[in-house]
Image: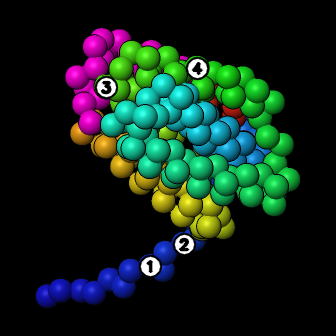
Amino acid sequence: MTTDHPKPPRRPRITGEGRMPGDPSREAMVEAMIRVDHAGEYGAVRIYQGQLAVLGRTKAGETIREMAAQERKHLDSFDRLVADRHVRPTALQPLWHVAGFALGAATALLGPRAAMACTQAVEEVIDEHYAGQAAKLGDDEAGLRGMIEEYRADEIAHRDRAVAEGAEQAPGHALLTEAIKAGSRLAIWLSTRI
Ligand SMILES: [Fe+2]
Ligand SMILES: [Fe+2]
């Protein structure tokens, strides 16, 4: 004999469920997410500008330009969100302006494969970062969650493209990507808070 257990209706998920006492409010949490994502997309645009300053006229330039165009789109969306929701942007934007460009130019000077290794490293960190955010956002923030999931898919595609273009053959690949990942995680930590 079989019994049919009707599935209980799915309870809507609310942003910040499972927060502990003393954790930031739901609003503060979402604000910090928008602030750090805006900073990250700004940094991405600057990294690619730095790479294009060096490799713009080479074969790799085409790939970099296509990825940069998507980063521009991501940044434009977060620019609008920052304005619409009156989020204070990170105070560190002048730092990301310089550091992003410098990272892009420095890796590009090591060669096109090192430039691709930079993209691979940054996008692996952003993939984790966006996945973590999407998991914290509830149905009350379905729009933001959908946007983050869409951009996460773009970033994963950038990572795959960079690997296809020889990122893993870059000289000193392990050391280079570990350093860039550590820097990216620090930048995320700082831009969430400052
Ligand atoms: Fe992006
Ligand atoms: Fe990207």
Q: Position of residue 100 (x, y in %)?
A: 60, 27
| Neighbours of disc 2 within 10 Å: few (<14), some (14-19), many (20+) | few
Please tell me which residue is depicted at 38% across the width and 43% down the height of the picture: 63
Residue 8 is labelled as 1
Q: Nearer the viewer, residue 38 or 165?
A: 165
> What residue appears at the point 35 percent right and 26 percent down from the top-left corner?
112
Label 4 Cα crowd, 10 Å radius (few <14 / some 14-19 / many 20+) = some
Indicate the secondary structure of the residue bearing disc 3.
helix
Structural crowding at the residue carrying mark 3, measured as other residues with C-alpha within 10 Å and reported as few (<14), some (14–19) or many (≥20): many
Task: Give the mark, 2 or 4, whose residue is nearer the N terminus.
Answer: 2
- The amino acid on which the numbered mark 1 sits, given as a three-letter code, is Pro
Label 3 – label 2 distance at C-alpha: 47 Å
* Residue picked out by circle 2: 11
Render colour scheme: rainbow
Secondary structure beneath label 4: helix
Q: Amino acid at mark 4?
A: Ala
Residue at the spot 48% in from the left edge and 25% down from the top edge = 54
- Residue 88 marker: none
176 relative position to 68: left or right: left
* Mark 3 in CB contact with mark 2 (< 8 angstroms): no
Q: Amino acid at mark 3?
A: Arg
Q: Relative to 92, is 160 on the left or the right? A: left
Do the numbered discs 1 and 2 sit on residues whose CB atoms are within 8 Å? Answer: yes
Question: Depth-wise, is mark 1 or mark 3 nearer the camera?
Answer: 3
Q: Nearer the viewer, mark 1 or mark 2?
A: 2
Which residue has dot 4 on it? 102
Q: Amino acid at mark 2?
A: Arg
Q: Which mark is residue 113?
A: 3
Q: Earlier in the sequence, mark 4 or mark 3?
A: 4
User: Who is closer to the viewer here, 114 or 77?
Assistant: 114
Q: Which residues are magenta?
A: 165-185
